[in-house]
Amino acid sequence: MENKSHAFAAGIFVMVVTALVIGLGVWLTRDRGNYNTYELSSREGVSGLQPQAAVRYKGVSVGKVTHIGFDTQTNGNVRFPIAVRLCPPIAPTTCAVRGQRGGTGRGSVLLDDAGESYPPLPPGSSGLPRLPLRTSPFSQISDQAPAILGQVQEATKRINQLLDEDNQRLLREALDNIGQAAGGINALSRRLDATVQQRLDPALAALPPLAQDARQTLQSLQQAGAQVSATAAEFGQTAQRLNAPGGVIDQATRSAQTLSQAVDRFGTATLPRMERAADETARAARLTGRAATSVSENPQGFLYGPGRGLPGPGEPGFTPPQPAGDSP
């Protein structure tokens, strides 16, 4: 009996110590943070989401899911409250998205700042404030999966139509034509190579002498240009000397002015005098002509002075002249 009592006491002691150790572990590992509780309501399924699932704000764990159940306020929705520490600021722009971690399928709740304010949601049946819940990318993909599958089926159908026998025959013909064209291009390339070797190579070989000649010609042109520049400079100096005050052009201008003044004086003074002298000379010439005519007609009058003239026809004493053959 005494052994049994000792064994019983030892068992009780072990159980008490185990309970104390477990209680100490729970007490040491308990979460002593301060939390705010919010409520989320989702029309989508929450497969993979369990109580105690992590709540993350920008990737940092800030809380946990406390409970999962149906929303009595909205039929068909799933309600799950979350406990969030006081450290991350929950602003009017904060929204929640249901996420899924890797290939394990374990769900989580992701909080993020949407950048725009959401209208405040009415509190749930429990009186907790509600956060807006956006549709997760996985839900969007699953919602669009039927449409995507239909598009894939349509694309597969069109590919099958594209690869039918007629199109395959046309494709083979096109490939044959492409092969023939490639052969023609290859032949053309060989001919071009032969042409380059036969014609361009000699031309390229002749380029260095041509380049040397071109350099020599360029040097000659440069020398000629220098000579032209020197000639132009000398011409400019000559032009400056010609245009300088007292130069050739200035002297020629003065000579022209002097000649113009002399011509003006000749036209205004000398020429009228010469015209009067010419008139007087003409008058004297006329008088001289008349005198010569008088002398030729009456030389006696020139010698003896003017006398009575011979009677003319019809006057008394007029004797007509006799012919030369009738003399006595």
Image (cartoon, grey):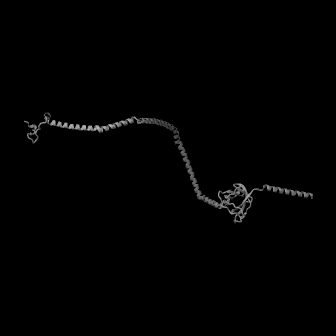
76 and 305: which is toward the camera: 305
Relative placement, left or right, of 312 versus 126 is left
Q: Please give the name of the residue rendered at 19% of the width and 37% of the height, measured from the top-left corner.
A: 287
Residue 53 visible within the image: no
Residue at the image position 33 percent from the left and 37 percent from the top: 261
Residue 98 in which image quadrant: bottom right
**Left or right for 244, reference 11:** left
Q: Is residue 166 left or right of residue 282?
A: right
User: Residue drawn at (52%, 42%), measured in percent from left and top?
Assistant: 200
The percent position of residue 304, horizontal first and vertical second, equals 13, 34
Q: Nearer the viewer, residue 252 or 189?
A: 252
Q: Position of residue 256 (x, y in %)?
A: 35, 37
Give the camera-side residue of 302 and 190. Answer: 302
* Position of the N terminus by quadrant: bottom right
Quarter in which the C terminus is drawn: top left
Q: Locate residue 251, reporting x and y percent.
A: 38, 35
Q: With respect to residue 98, does 202 lie above or below?
A: above
Residue 246, percent from left and from top:
40, 34
Residue at far right of view: 1
